[in-house]
Image (cartoon, rainbow, N blue to C red):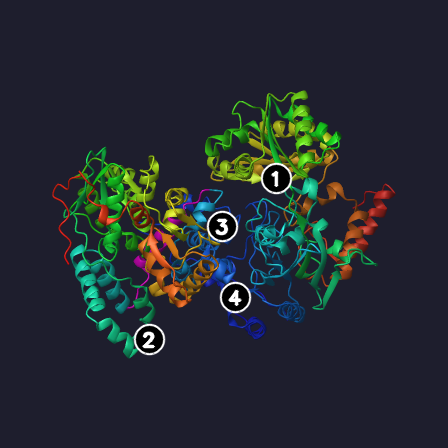
Amino acid sequence: MSRAHDHLIERLERILGPGGVFHRPADLLVYEYDGSVEGAVDTAAPVAVALPTTTEQVAAIVRLANEFDLPVTPRGAGTGLSGGAVAQRGGIVVALTRMDRILEIDPEDRTALVEPGVINLELSEATIPGGHFFAPDPSSQKACTVGGNVAENSGGPHCLKYGVTTNHVLGLEVVLPDGRVVWTGGRAGHAPGYDLTGALVGSEGMLGIVTKALVRLTPNPEATLVELAAFPDVESASLAVSRIIAAGIVPAALELMDNLTIQAVEPAYHAGYPMDAGAVLLAELDGIAEDVRAEGEDVAVLCRETGATSVRVASEKPERDLLWKGRKMALAAMGRLTPNYYLHDTVVPRTKLPAALRRVAEVATEYDLPIANVLHAGDGNLHPLILFDRRQPGAVERVLHASHELLHSCVELGGALSGEHGIGTEKRAALTLVFSADDLAAMAGIKNSFDPKSCFNPEKLFPAGYRCGEVRALRAQALAQKLGIYAM
Amino acid sequence: MAVAYETDLAKLGTLTGYSGPDQPDDDLLRACVHCGMCLPSCPTYRLTGQEMSSPRGRLWLMRGVADGRLDLLDPIFDEQMYQCLNCRACEAVCPSGVHYGPLVEAARSQLERHRPRPVWQRVLRRVALGGVFGDQRVFRAVVGGLRLYQRSGLAALVRRTGVLKPLKLAETERMMPPVAARFLRPGAERWTPSSPARAVRLFNGCVMGTVFADTNRAAGRVLAHNGAAVDVPVGQQCCGALHVHAGMMDEARALAKTNIAAFEAAPDGEIAVTAAGCGAALKEYGFLLKDDPAWAERARAFADRVRDVTELLADRPLAVPTQAVDRIVTYQEPCHLAHAQRITAQPRAILDAIPGLTLVEMRESSLCCGSAGIYNLIRREMAEELGDRKARHVLETPATAVVTANPGCAMQLRASLARNGSAASVVHVVEVLDEAYGGSAAWPPEGGREPGGSRPQRP
């Protein structure tokens, strides 16, 4: 190891104490991945991992990184699926798992002040007895951190009604890329000036490190109802989705699972999904008891009108949980069908769901890969699960091709690249599918003003080879496009 | 100033990898997709917040060795394989169904095979695990000595001198419950209802058959109350769980074969186990002996007969308990019951069936208490931190007793509760049920017979 390296570690240890810094190769090995699929996201080890416990320590680490000209990659629990927490250009990983205190719960203002390492579900567990919960509920909510949710603007089944993370963040304490500590937003809700909180949520760790988050709490609903409707095929189920939304009903969650998923889930968990159904729709309604009952009846009627062969209604918690179990354990059940799966994440306008699902089926045939569908159908968010066996030669490549194909098709249908997993390195190359060079340049302007040295979480979001210094080049490209000159 | 981590190219290719028997199975290893769902369930990750102390991190390290990217003899690898409590909470929550337990056990076995240990450690392992746990007679003699120490007044004397503190034995001593007045010897006692519907063979275990012999007797009585003729087949030995956890696979296999043969001599009926740790190990004999053609099938057949005592009781409608047990209790899930054997509902169902008893759940009831076999003896600091956390959760409840189903947990809980100022007692599920059936005073039941019966209680 070089002297500069030793010096860096020594300085880090001065900030964090010896227990807060990791730098031996074996230690760094386990920080080279996150939850992303191997093959879709490259692994990369940092030079050092810092585990701070205070905002001051985070700021000191960032200043040190500046001094040493090292990239900084913030990391929560490392459950992300787009490579956001992988230190693609080495440098220092700042893991916030030891900043895991809930600092304050204010039931009257319905807010909670938390450190970034607090686990999503544990925040809700702490606030539910007082009558509130933290609404964003990504499937990884048992493990993922609030800081990670902020960075990725995470969603989940219930974001159909309650919105994604950005709708639940009121303010942030942030260490900026130059080491200054600032507060954005606040309890008052609407602060004048630029909405920096909005800019930071979903910035994938590229604009700063969140050290405290003031989040909104949502009152526990008075009543909850879950309905399971079985359909002969995915088309009729997705038609029901459109009808339900068009009728002005906003379910808390509206999830669709296809037959392949049912085949995997039902034998394993006995959730009561009809094995012969082409698709099932899981609708959760919550709110005031009378509304829930009335809407529940409406949903059942709409489902039957669109071809549902059966509708099961569960109002008691154990039965609701059982119906949900099939959905929540869908990924686990896939593990029983196949050694590996690639969980995809795209969005299309709700009305385009049938077309998108048809395309998924075509891709499955074209690439000879079974694809199961689990959808946050209510907001058009597809999660095709491509099943494969890594040990078969060429399987990974085929999966990557197929997933690229899916991405293209969804964009063609007017969709987006990601519903809730972020772009990271996984989809950075596809960004130009939906954004023009001007669009990208506008985004880069934000990045540039926060992080002019481009040290924070490099190699993410923007297409490869793209640096902030190249904004001008991009503008030129945009101009060329506009003028019809394709010289690039 | 640029800083880069350069791979030491000269070292590549000279790394020690896995070799010989008991290597971590490559397919099992690669089933992990590092999604991270295991993190919050892992006690060492909860305490440290660091990735290498997580199941995912440890699996990645194991893979690193398999792929030639990490030296088997790297001290960090050693540290992490043994920092793990092998509580297997990660296994129970893994969406991909990764069998973590067998992997970490194989990694430890590789370490034991390839990494020289200091002589004193080798001697200690050989004497403690090989000599004492390896032979029931020796084990009974040692525990007999302990009983003498507890009862002769020597214990009180030693405690007064304060000599245990500098020797760091105070905590170990505090853990020890009073040793049962009479050990349970295989073949010596049996419990038979008036019209037995089936046979059940009790697995005695080392600690359960000695220190907690009365718990095993309670198990015999409650099973008999539920229609089973219960005996303790002769020839059985330690289950070998501690050996497997310590990477001593050959010793574990030898014990397994002895036990399989002993229970083959009593071929009918299920094998009841009162220690969750033993039960998990016994159920995995099939895996342990899978590569031994002479034993693989026999091991599988044996494993199929093994049931935790709570599982066995909850399988059939429970004989209705008649005596009220007016007590508030909380339940601590033994890791090797909840995670390794996935038994969580049955003990609670039994407690629910007891009149007068109120079960109040504590927070994190399925998080390891820090016992983990002999972990609390060799890694005191982390074990105590977990024990304190557990005691705090108990103290948050109004419970006056903690119910569990494993001797290691029972001892660790005792010490942790005492250290944290709790007066709560620690009991096994079957002891509470036995009390609700009237206890030893109500045995043998009227009209019941005791062929070859219990020896009369010594005063």
Task: Give the distance between the C-alpha atoms of the residues marked 2 and 4, in whole angstroms.
Answer: 36 Å
Residue A462 visible in rendering: no
Residue B346: image location, x then y, percent: 38, 42
B375 falls in the magenta region: no
Q: Secondary structure at mark 1?
A: loop
Q: Secondary structure at mark 2?
A: loop
Q: Residue at x 65, y 22 (%)?
A: A304
Residue A467 visible in rendering: yes
* Above or below B449: residue B274: below
B100 falls in the magenta region: yes
**Are discs 4 and 1 located on one and the same chain?**
yes
Query: Is label 2 in contact with label 3 (beta carbons under 8 Å)?
Result: no
Q: Amino acid at mark 2?
A: Lys
Residue to which mark 4 is pinned: A23
Q: Amino acid at mark 4?
A: His
| Residue positioned most to the left | B452
Q: From the viewer's perspective, is B321 left or right of A158? A: left
Q: Which residues are magenta?
A: B97-118
Q: Chain of mark 1?
A: A
Q: Chain of mark 2?
A: B
Residue B402: image location, x then y, percent: 38, 55
| Residue positioned most to the right | A483
Q: Residue at x 68, y 21 (%)?
A: A305
Task: Give the distance between the C-alpha atoms of the residues marked 2 and 1, in whole angstroms.
Answer: 58 Å
Residue to which mark 2 is pinned: B165
Residue A237: image location, x then y, percent: 64, 26
Q: Amino acid at mark 1?
A: His
